[in-house]
Image (tube, rainbow, N blue to C red):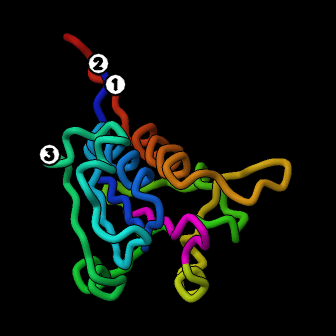
Amino acid sequence: MDSYNSTINIVLLEPRIPGNVGTIGRLCYAIDATLHLIKPYGFGDITKKELRRAGLDYWEFLKVFEYEDIQSFWHKHTISNNHYFATTKTDKNYFDVNFSHNTYIYFGREDAGLPQYILEKNQHNCITIPMKNEARSLNLSNSVSIISYEIVRQHTKRLSTI
């Protein structure tokens, strides 16, 4: 039996597509991660209809928190060495990082990524998913899945059955 001991925090800054939020919520529920949503959204409020479309009928069981802006988030979760910023604007691959047991991974808007001022201020903790063929980026929910499961992989321990 496998088990992992890690606290994963997914931070979505100003998401634009409600289906991505629902899909990411479903992932967070599956791996027991916490989802932090930072406004303004590109779609108004999160509705049950949009969540059902993404197959998330257990939103009420998800650990999810909403913030009015990034400053409100940072007031409660001060940036430290366990905060990582997903971007295409770095050469540091996500799989080259040894993630701590309490990790925050930031993802930006689907149409713009994370703001440049955040990336510049946190260059040492910017990470990327390598891509070939000059692809601009991956879908947001795919990116969250890839990096989240690397954290799960790093923190999975095989439990022996004695």
Judge depth for marks 1 and 3 and give the one in front: 3
Image quarter in which the C terminus is found: top left
Q: x, y (%) of residue 118?
A: 52, 83
| Amino acid at the residue labelled 3 | Phe
User: Label 2, label 3: how many angstroms apart (C-alpha)?
Assistant: 24 Å
Secondary structure under tag 1 reads: strand
- Secondary structure beneath disc 3? helix
Which residue is disc 3 drawn over? 61
The answer to whether residue 82 is visible is no
Tag 2 and tag 1, C-beta contact below 8 Å: yes
The answer to whether residue 35 is visible is: yes
Q: Secondary structure at mark 2?
A: loop
Tell me which amino acid carries mark 1: Arg
For residue 159, above or below residue 125: above
Q: Residue furthest front?
A: 49
Q: Residue at x 46, y 41 (%)?
A: 149
Sequence order check: which comes first, mark 2 or mark 1? 2
Between 145 and 19, the one nearer to me in the picture: 19
**SS assignment for the magenta stretch, majority:** loop
Residue drawn at the location 30% of the way across and 37% of the way down: 30
The residue closer to the viewer here, 123 or 12, is: 12
Label 1, label 3: how many angstroms apart (C-alpha)?
27 Å
Which residue is the site of mark 2?
1
Of discs 2 and 3, which sits in the foreground?
3
Which percent across, then down, holds residue 8?
33, 54
Q: Which residues are magenta?
A: 104-114
Residue 98 circle label: none
For label 1, the residue is 158
